[in-house]
Amino acid sequence: MNTSPDDPSRRTLLSLATTAALTAAATLPTFTASAAPARPAEAPLPADAARQQLWWQAPGDEGSLIEQGLPIGNGRIGALASNDSGRELLLISDATMWTGGLNDTLDKDGQFPYGRSDFGSFTLLAKVTVDIPDHELGAVNTYRRTLDLAQGLVTSSYVRSGITYRREMYASHPDDVIVLRFTQSGGGRYTGTITLTGTHGENPTAAESFGATLPNGLRYGAAVKARATGGKVTVNDTRIDFSGCRELTVVVSAGTNYAPDAAAGFRNPSLDPERLARTKVRDAASESADALRRTHIADYRALYAKLDLSLGTSSAEQRELDTWERLHVRTRDLVPDPELEAAYLQFGRYLMISGSRDSLPLNLQGLWLDGNDPDWMGDYHTDINIQMNYWMADRTGLSQCFDTFTDYCLAQLPSWTKLTQTLFNDPRNRYRNSTGRVAGWTVAISTNPYGGGGWWWHPAGNAWLCNSLYEHYEYTQSRAYLAKIYPLLKGACEFWEARLLPHTLPGTTKEVLIADSDWSPEHGPLDAKGITYAQELVWALFGNFAAASALLKKDTAYADTITGMRKRLYLPQVSPKTGWLEEWMSPDNLGETTHRHLSGLVGLFPGDRIRPDGSTPKKIVDAATAQLTARGMNSFGWANAWRSLCWARLKDAEKAYRLVVNNLRPSSGGSNGTAFNLFDVYEVEQGRGIFQIDANFGTPAAMTEMLLYSRPGHLELLPALPDAWASSGHITGLPARGGFVVDVKWRDAKPTSVRLRSVGGRTTTVEFAGRTRNVVLKAGASVTLKDFDR
C-alpha cells in the first residue's frame, strides 16, 4: 500500500529517525573528564551577603538527614551533610544513580509496572564519614552551622578548649568534586579517620575508592583523597587516618557510566567510574584549598548573582534568631519577616544551581537522599512535579539550569516514541485511541531515565512537557533552542491529531474536537472524554507548535492543519450548577472539591489563556476564581505553591502571600510544612511526612509571579504585591517572557525605578496600575522608565 508523506505513521517514523540523529549528536556521557578549570582571583561579595545566610545552632541528626542535613551539589553529584563536630557524615548521590530499566511492558490492567525492581528507583551512591573522636558535641561549645547562599558554602564552627575549629564544604562544578576543608585558629589539631563506603553491600576496592555494578548493569564508583598541613595522613586497607593536622582537606568524587543515549542503552560501556573518580580527586587535591574555593565561588556566583532581591527590612530581633527559630516565630506571631522570605526564594535558587546542571533533571527528591528507597522511587512525575521543578528556573535568572530538563526530554524521545507506537493502543490500555490510530509520542504518569514508564499512561503529559519547553523559548528567544525542541512539539501534535475525536455539542449542530477517555489528575472518573486538563494543554500545544513552525519556516502545511484543529477544540464552560469552570464536560463536580491538584485550572497557570485583563470573558475568569476558591488555602506544599501562582495571576496579592507563608510553617511530626533544613515536607499519612522538592521551587516561582507578570509583548509590574512587602524593596535581573530582563525598585507599593534590558525581545508594553508604556528596544539595549510612581 502506498503511503502519503502526510500519513501519521510515516510522519512518526521520519520524526523518530530525525530525532534519534539529533539526540545522538547532541548528547555526551554524564560523568566525563573535566577540563582544567581557570583559577580566578577572589571576587567581592555584595554588601548584604550576611542577610543571605541561613544558620542553625545544632547539627543534623544522622537518623533524619533528609530533614536536618544541609544540601550541597554541583548539579550532578550532591550530598546531605550532618555537620556534627565529632562525626561528619556525607550521604553522596549522583543524579544518574538509578536502578530499573526500560520497563516496556503493561500488566493485565494496562499499567506499566511501578516498583523498584522493574521501573527502578533513584538511590544513594556512597557515604563518607570523617570521625574526630575528641570533638564530640559534648566536648565542644558555641556550635553554629551556616548555609551561605551568596557563595554556595556550608560551614560549621565550634569551640573546644578555647580553640575555634571551623569546617567548610561545597560541591564544585568546575572541578566536579565535593570539598571539605577543616581549619582552626589558636594551635589546635585534628586527629581521626576518613571512611568511604558504598550503600549497596559493595566490597571496597581500597580505602580511597570503590567500584561496583547494579543488577541493571549500571556501573558506578567513588573516590576520596585527603591532604593535610602539619601532621600526617596514612592510607590503610579500609580507611584513611590523619593525626596532628593543623588543616585537613578532603576531596570526594563519584559517578556512573550512565549515558543519555537510547541507542546505546543509556550506558557508556567504555567508562570506568571508579578510575575517573580517582582521577578527579587526584587532580583537585593537587590544587591549593584556596584555589579550589575561589574557583567554586566564581562559578557559582556567575549564576547566583544574576538576580538580587529585597522584600523589605526585618527587625533586629528577627535577625538575632537562628533560621529554625525565625520560622517558628514567623508562624506564631504572624508578623512578616521579609528578609527570611527573600532568603527562602534564594534558597530555592541555591537548590536549583546545586541540583540541575549538566546531568539529569531534578526529580521528586531533587538531588538529595538519605536512603536507597525514596517514596515514589524519586521519579519524574509528568502530571505536575517535574514541570513545577522548573517553573522558577527562567523566572529567577537560572535559564541555564533549565537545560537538563530539555536534554532529558530529547534523550528520552526515541524510547517514548517507540513505547507509544508499540503499547499505547494495546487493548489493555484504558486510554487507547478510539480512532484505532496512533502517531507521535506521549508518556506515562511516571518516567525514569531509561526511557521507561510507570503507573498509567498519561496522554496529555506530552503536551504539558512541550508547553514547559516552549515557555523556556519565550524567555530566551533562542531560535537554536526552538529548533532543538521542534521534534518534540511536532511529535506531540501528531499524537493528538490521531487521538482527538469529533463531538457534536448537545442541542446544537456545532461539531468540536475533544480528547479521548482520560483522567483529570489525580481524581474523578478514570475514563472521561473532553477533560479540561487535556483540552487546555492541547490548545496551548497547538498554538506553540504553529508559532514555532512560523518562526523556523518549517512544515507550513502541517501547521495550518494544526491551527485548524485548534480552532475546533472544545474549551471548558461555566457550570450552571456550581458556577465553577467545568473540570469535566459536565455541570457536576465529579471529583474532590478540595483536591490537591488544580488540573482544571491549567489554563490559568501554567497556561495563560485565562486572564483577568479583559482579554478573557469575565464569566470564565469568575468561574476559574470560584473553582480555585473551592480548592481551599491549606494543602501540601507543592499544591499551596500552585494555588499561590494562580492567585498571583488573578492579582489577589494577599491570598498568594498567605499560601507562600503557609509553606514556611515549621513541620512537626511529619506535618505539611518546612523542615529544619528548609526542605519541604509532604504529609502522606498521619504522622509521616516525606521530602518532596517541588514546593521548594514552586513557592519561589509564585513569589516572582507576584512581582512581575509577563507574556510575550506585555509586562505588568507588581501585579500582586502583598502588604508585607509593599513598604520598600527591589528586584534586579528578573526575566520576562518575550526576551526581557527587568529591574524594579518600589516604595509604598509603587515603582520608583524601572529598567528594561532586551535579551532578544524587541517590543513590549509595560503596565502598572492601568498605566501603560510602549517600549521598543534593539537586542542587548536597555531603557529606564520613569513616572510609574505618580
Image (tube, rainbow, N blue to C red):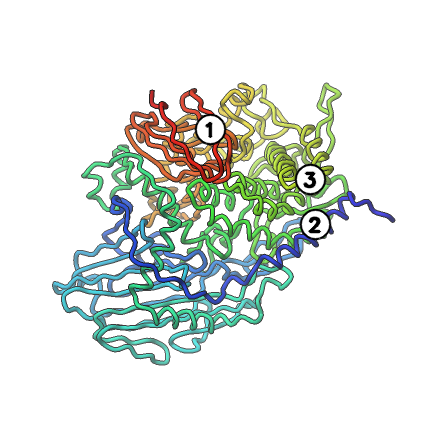
Using the image, determine if residue 18 lies above or below residue 531.
Answer: below
Name which residue lies at 68% across and 28% down.
567
Q: Of tags 3 and 2, which is closer to the observer?
A: 2
* Nearer the observer, 252 or 590: 252
Which callout, 1 or 2, points at the residue further toward the start of the chain?
2
**Viewed as shown, does residue 790 lie left or right of 245?**
right
**298 to the left or right of 315:** right
Q: Within 10 angstroms of label 1, few (less than 14), some, or many (20 or more) residues?
A: some
Residue matched to label 2: 15
Percent from the top left, x then y, of residue 504?
A: 73, 25
Q: Is residue 508 left or right of residue 572?
A: right
Q: Give the amino acid type for the residue marked by disc 2 in the picture.
A: Ser
Q: Quadrant of the C terminus?
A: top left
Q: Is residue 619 above or below residue 689?
A: above
> What residue did someone put label 1 on?
775
Q: Residue furthest right?
A: 1
Give the residue at mark 3.
496
> Residue at 70% across / 54% down in the picture?
17
Q: Earlier in the sequence, mark 1 or mark 3?
A: 3
User: What separation in Å lies between label 1 and label 2 (alpha carbons)?
Assistant: 40 Å
